[in-house]
Amino acid sequence: MRHKKKNIIELTHCTASQYVDIPKLPVAVLLDNVRSMYNVGAVFRTADAFLIEEIILAGISGCPPHPEIKKTALGAEESVKWRYEEDAFEAALSMKEKGWKICVLEQAHNSIPLQNFNPQPEEKYLLVAGNEVSGVNQNILEIADYVIEIPQHGVKHSLNVSVSVGIALWQLVKENLDS
């Protein structure tokens, strides 16, 4: 079998206006003080690919429109629903009160290895990712329903936050995406 790259026409699934009407998966992302605009943009792009319901940008996390976000989001900052909240803890608590399961992505004692986390189809999940240096604020961990961790085995002890979000989102949505 020969493999041939798809062209842009074959890769185009919908227009930005059509995207709005596509049903989204019951997953949202909360970025807790993510300082890099490039990371924020990359999360937008991943959220678009996986039909995430919304992105909540909190604290010092940058917001569109911003040239660095636009550079990595490649337009996803216009298709993915997003909002800004000053306080990440309050945003997480509000989502929890609305029935969302708080799923913190963090290296922590008693965390669940990502490959062992099995999202339930009837639940709504808020994936919380934190600052590139200090991670997710401890007060959010204390209200979390789940703390999940991506196992790592190399010399470095962490992954880029946008890469981590992408890996975790795949685990959360893979059963709900059709090809």
Image (tube, rainbow, N blue to C red):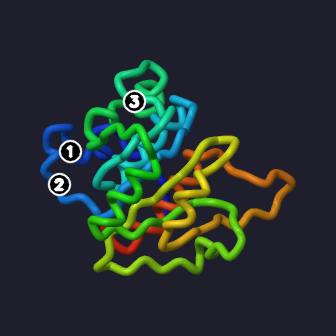
Residue matched to label 2: 22
Residue under the point 53% across and 62% down: 104
Q: Is residue 13 above or below residue 122?
A: above
Q: Mark 1 packing: few (<14 Cα in 10 Å), some, or many (20+)?
A: few
Q: Is residue 103 above or below residue 163?
A: below
Residue matched to label 3: 63
Given residues 71 and 127, the one toward you in this image is 127
Residue matched to label 1: 14
Instruction: Name the spot of residue 177 as percent of width and height, x first.
Output: 33, 67
> Can residue 9 be seen by looking at this rendering?
yes
Instruction: Name the spot of residue 46 as percent of width and height, x first.
Output: 43, 48
User: Where does the C terminus fall, quadrant-wise?
Assistant: bottom left
- Distance (Cα) linking label 2 and label 1: 9 Å
Instruction: Name the spot of residue 53 as percent of width and height, x first.
Output: 28, 54
Residue under the point 56% across and 57% down: 139
Q: Mark 3 packing: few (<14 Cα in 10 Å), some, or many (20+)?
A: some
Q: Mark 2 packing: few (<14 Cα in 10 Å), some, or many (20+)?
A: few
